[in-house]
Amino acid sequence: MRYTRIEEAVFKSRPNRFIAHVVTKRGEEICHVKNTGRCRELLLPDARIWVQRNDSPDRKTALDLIAVEKNGRVINMDSQIPNKVAEAWIRGGHLFSENVKIFPETRYGNSRFDLYLEEEDRRMYLEVKGVTLEEDGVARFPDAPTERGVKHVRELIVCRKAGYLAGILFIIQMQGICRLEPNDRTHPEFGEALRMAADAGVQIMAVDCLVTPDSIQADKEIEVRL
């Protein structure tokens, strides 16, 4: 996936979850933050960031925050991109063949899952989670409590018991990761649900990404350690 109209900028502050104050070549501007997670270890004062400009008069802000540099590593922060990365990865012959039919935002029970995959007699509900938190080479999810995430994991267990394939695909929005672990320190309930799902036959997968300031692409599968 490639972005257009990317500009380098400097992060200054984040007064709330949705906006940040940044400095571009035009001076100080307000930027929309697509990722509503805490991202405290990423959005530090004077951090090097990359933003996407859109001067449409219909927008409240002209900028979207796309990526940030942390210790020399570029990390994609766009919470809307993991589903697209996952779909491209699947269409590349992972999980199913290249002939798989993919339906986004498909409801089952009380949840709407990111992707529903179908090929002949194989049917799968798949939830996609973007990961931006890294500690000493280990990716962790979530970076903040997510009751919605726990609900989705539990619903995937229901899907599996009903005879469907079910899975969770963590898209790690950076490279150089050795494994992924649930962030039990931040939200132990999510880790417990994830382990229950694995025991019930739900596939738990993680893929890292090749990331530049203006692109992101799934690279290779990474160990998931529950």
Image (spheres, grey):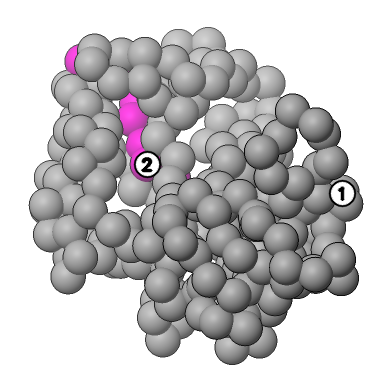
Pick whichever, 78 or 44, lies toward us. Answer: 44
Residue hosting label 1:
4
Task: State the mark number for residue 135.
Answer: none
Residue 124: quarter of image:
top left
| Amino acid type of the residue tagged 2 in the rendering | Ile
In what element is the residue under mark 1? loop
Q: Is residue 49 left or right of residue 152?
A: right
Pick whichever, 65 or 186, lies toward us. Answer: 65
Q: Whole-percent x and y of residue 24?
A: 79, 69
Q: Is residue 91 magenta?
A: no
Q: Whole-percent x and y of residue 220?
A: 60, 60
Q: Is residue 45 left or right of residue 85?
A: left
Q: Is residue 178 left or right of residue 75?
A: left
Q: Is residue 99 left or right of residue 187?
A: right
Task: State the mark number for residue 168.
Answer: 2
Residue at x-position 71% and y-position 34% = 59
| Amino acid type of the residue tagged 1 in the rendering | Thr
Few, some or many residues within 10 Å of mark 2 (<14, 14–19, 20+): many
Q: Earlier in the sequence, mark 1 or mark 2?
A: 1
In what element is the residue under mark 2? strand
Q: Whole-percent x and y of residue 195?
A: 16, 51
Residue at x-position 37% and y-position 41% = 168
Q: Which residues are magenta?
A: 162-169
